Image (cartoon, grey):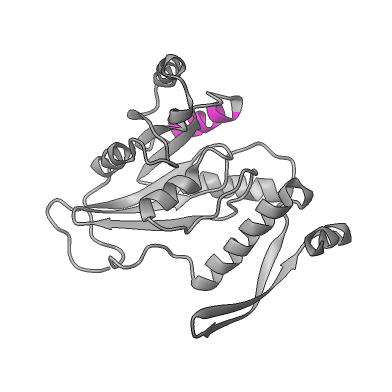
Amino acid sequence: MVGSIAPSFQSGYVGLIGKPNVGKSTLLNYFIGRKISITSHWPQTTRSRILGILTRPDAQVMFIDSPGWHRTSHALGRQLLSIAKGVVEEADVVLTMLDAVTGITLEDRRVFEHVQRSQRPAILALNKADAVNKSRLLPLLQACVAVGCFAEYVPISALRGDNMDRLLGELIRRLPTGPKWFGAEQQTDQSTDQLIREFIREQVLRVTRDEVPHAVAVLLDEVVQRPAVLLIRATILVARPGQKAILIG
């Protein structure tokens, strides 16, 4: 613990949940001001609980990114869903994200039901609102309000930064009074090695698209800091020889 509790200092955990590709990692990176969670257009990019720490004079917000919420029949998917559910239980405030372009899907309704059962304070962010005509956005907002389990509904664009200050204010207002749990200079619980592994995996996903499955993993063999350059040697692991040929090619 760093320091003592200020009279009006708010601190707590904000759990980010939602179906795949709603923009959770983009939102986290925006608020932290640097890339700590990788992004791609493909589901299951985020595989673990990732902590991002935002410290302000009046608050410390600890965002927890989570894997996308989805139904699955394989072991990896079940593990990712279990992580996402755990984030809800850990959070002081749950920030549920909805893709305003796709609207409310069956997966979104499953997320809503879990949030309602958790009885945690919850806010709904309608992301990608900049890509939706206002004539469509208002009925969508009304449909979300009808769900009835959120304290606030905020249309945003995590990519452009639209309405993000308002969203942050709504989150901080609902956090408990508490201490600074982390130093102001700390922005994540991810080590440098963890970040490097994830950044390499992100590029594999971007370059190979759907030709290499999300079972790909990265091992760091060597990281050497030299003047003006960081030397990285890594091994990329795939499931089948054919996928190895795709990466080499």
* Residue at (69% x, 63% y) in the render: 217
Q: Quadrant of residue 230?
A: bottom right
Q: Nearer the viewer, residue 200 or 88?
A: 200
Q: Position of residue 3 (x, y in %)?
A: 19, 68
Q: Position of residue 76 (x, y in %)?
A: 69, 51
Does the magenta portion include 113? yes
- Start and end of the magenta stretch? 107-117
Image vertical order of residue 225 relative to residue 85, above or below: below
Left or right of 221 in this view: 26: left
Q: Main secondary structure of the magenta part?
A: helix
How many numbered marks, from 0 up? 0
Left or right of 57 in this view: 184: right
Q: Nearer the viewer, residue 120 or 151?
A: 151
Image vertical order of residue 93 relative to residue 239, above or below: above
Q: Is residue 28 visible?
A: yes
Q: Position of residue 57 (x, y in %)?
A: 19, 56
Q: Nearer the viewer, residue 27 or 78?
A: 27
Which residue occupies the extreme left position in the image? 7
Quadrant including the C terminus: bottom right
Does the magenta portion include 110? yes
Q: Is residue 88 visible?
A: no
Q: Position of residue 160 (x, y in %)?
A: 41, 40
* Residue at (56% x, 68% y) in the render: 196
Left or right of 12 in this view: 40: right
* Residue at (45% x, 20% y) in the render: 133
